[in-house]
Amino acid sequence: MKQGWVSIGGMIWAAAVLSVQAADLQGREDASGQTIWFDGPALPIEGRAFQDTDVYYDRLPARARATVPSSVWGLSRHSAGMALRFVTDANRVTVRWAVRNAALAMPHMPATGVSGVDLYQRTPGGWRFVKNGRPSAVTNTVEIAITPNAECLVYLPLYNGTARVEVGIPKGRALRAPPPRANGQTRPVVFYGTSITHGGCASRPGMAFTAIAGRLADAPVVNLGFSGSGKMELALCDLIAEIDASVYVLDCLWNMNDDLVRERAEPFIRALRDKRPATPILLAEDCNVFGRAPTSKAAILRALYEKLKAEDGAKWAELHYLEAREMLGHDGEGTVDGCHPNDLGMMRQGTLFGQALHRILTRPVQ
C-alpha cells in the first residue's frame, strides 16, 4: 500500500492510496453513447479539506456554521482552491459545471475568475495552462483538446460556489487517478487569509497566487481565504489545525488593523503551534500597491516573530517569515484597484510564496 496525495470521493488528505491509483475509474455513458461522464465526487480532488460539508464543494464543515463569523461561513461556500486531478488517454475532455450564484462576475473581477474553470497539464517543464471555461450562465460546458496521458488539473471557481462538475471523455477512452508526486508531497499547504488569498482578482482560477505557488512548489493546496474576513479568530485556528498540513501559511494582515494584530496574532499562532507542534508555519506581511514595506502591521508581526524565535528556539524552529517587499512589485502595476492583485501581481506574489514554500518543504527537519 502506498501513501498518496489523492482524495477519492473526499477522503482525508494523505490517506493511503490503494490499487485504484492505477485502475481506470468508472463513469457513466450518456444517451448518445459517445461520451463517458465522471461526476466530480468520484474524481481525485485537491483543496477539499473536510468531508462533513453541507455541499460537496464547500470549504468548511457544516458544524463550522455555529462557530465562525457569518461572513466567513458564507464565503466558505465558494470552491476557491479546489481542483480535480486525473490522467486520461483521451485527446480531449469536456468539463460541464454549474455554479450556485447567478452573479457570475464582480466589478473588478471577470466571470472567468469568479465562476470559471481552468485546465492545466503537467509537462516536462512543469504545469502549463491549456484552456479555461468561460461562464455565460449558471450551467456551462467547455470542450478542451489535451495531450493524452499527461496529468490534468482542473481548477474550480474562485468566488462562486460549485453546485456540480462533471468531466467527460470519448467512449473507449479511460480516466484514472494520477500517480503520486515525484517529490513525495502528500499533505497540503494550507493558506489562511483574506480576499487576496481567496483569489481576488485573478482573471481565472489557476492565476490565484495560491494556485501559482502550489504549482511552483508542486504541492497540493487548501485555500482558506475569506474576502474581508481573514481576522485570526480562534475558531478558525481550531478548524485549520484539523487539517494535516505540510505548511500553514498565515496571510491575514490585509484585513487587520494594528490593534487587531496586537490582540489576535499571538494567541492564534501559539494555539496553532500547540495543536500542531512540528508543522511549519509561514507568517506573511502585507504591503501597498507600490510594494513599500514593512507596514505598521507588518512591523508588529515581525516583532512577534522575533519574540517567539528568541523565546524558545526549538519550539519555534519551524516558524518562518515572508517579507512583502517584492510582493506586488514597485511599478504600481500589480493591482486592479490599488489593493487586489491583477494577474501580474498574482504572478509576482505566487512566485515569492512558491519559492518560500519550496525552501521550507525541502529543508532538513530541525
Image (cartoon, rainbow, N blue to C red):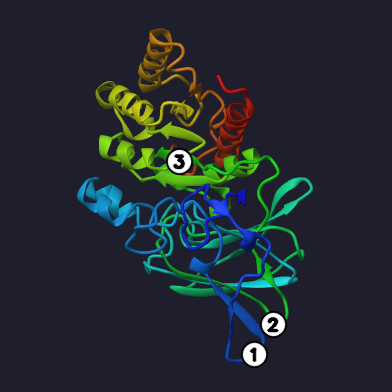
Circles 3 and 2, Cβ within 8 Å, touching? The answer is no
Q: Nearer the viewer, mark 3 or mark 2?
A: 3
**Above or below — where is 35 with respect to 150?**
below
Asked which quadrant contains residue 233, the reply is top left
Identity of the residue drawn at 46% across and 14% down: 314
Q: Which residue matches tag 1?
A: 33
Q: How many marks?
A: 3
Q: Nearer the viewer, mark 3 or mark 1?
A: 3
Q: Which residue matches tag 3?
A: 244
Amino acid type, label 2: Lys
**Above or below — where is 134 with respect to 237?**
below
* Secondary element type, mark 2: loop
Amino acid type, label 3: Asp
Q: Earlier in the sequence, mark 3 or mark 2?
A: 2
Circles 1 and 2, Cβ within 8 Å, touching? The answer is yes
Q: Which residue matches tag 2?
A: 171
* Secondary element type, mark 1: loop
